[in-house]
Image: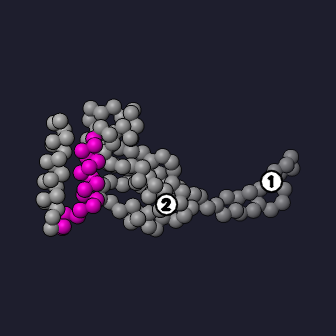
Amino acid sequence: MVLFELDSTGIVGEPEAIDLHPTELRELEWSEGDDLTTIARGIPPSTICKLKLNVPLGTNVQALQATARNLIARLCWPPDIRWEGAEGVDLRAGSLALERADWQGTVRSYVREQVPEVDPDFKEISAAVEELLFEEGTS
């Protein structure tokens, strides 16, 4: 940018060149299975970021938001949330109501976080969870 002063006679003094350092704006997108640390790595601290979360119904978005807030210095708040599998659910109810609406999904997500698929007991644990969910859903 060039800064100069004008008066009725024209330019006063010498024009001055001023370097501009614009703030970068970056849109980030997270989906289940993505690593927020990897996404946040390499983002300069001065960059303003907007985050979009693509999450299955029942996901604890508060935990994701807290993690993102810790990793990304200048994160716009709140992030955009796109609920997958939310057809027929009143989205105006808020994220906690959505989590309650799909409590089975919350349980499944928790078990997936705690027991990796490579665990030798994964299939048995998953089958037991599904059996309990079925029983709870029909009672």
Numbered circles on residues, count: 2
Which numbered mark, 2 or 1, is in the foreground of this view? Answer: 2
- Residue drawn at 52 percent across, 65 percent down: 44
Q: Position of residue 124 (x, y in %)?
A: 13, 59
Residue 65 image point, x, y percent: 44, 52
Q: What mark, if any, has residue 70 been given in the picture?
A: 2
* Residue 114 vertical position relative to residue 138 in the rendered view, above or below: below
- Residues 32 and 101: in front is 101
Residue at image mark 1:
5
Q: Identify the element where label 1 is drawn.
A: strand
Residue 29 location in percent, x, y? 38, 53
Task: Indicate whether 38 appears above or below 7.
Answer: below
The magenta stretch is: 102-119
Instruction: Rate crowding at label 2 as few (under 14), some (14 to 19) or many (20 or more) other CA atoms within 10 Å.
Output: few
Q: Can residue 78 be seen in this view?
A: yes
Mark 2 element type? helix
What is the CA distance from the residue labelled 2 to the residue labelled 1?
Answer: 45 Å
| Kind of residue indicated by mark 2 | Asn
**Residue 60 x %, y %:** 36, 49
Amino acid marked by disc 1: Glu
Residue ID at (29%, 48%) = 106
Characterize the magenta stretch by its predominant secondary structure: helix
**Residue 25, can we see it?**
no
Residue at 47% across, 51% down: 50
> For this view, does 75 lie left or right of residue 129?
right
Identify the image quadrant of the N terminus. bottom right
- The answer to which quarter of the image holds residue 23 is bottom right
Closer to us: 55 or 18: 55
In primary-sequence order, the first of circles 2 and 1 is 1
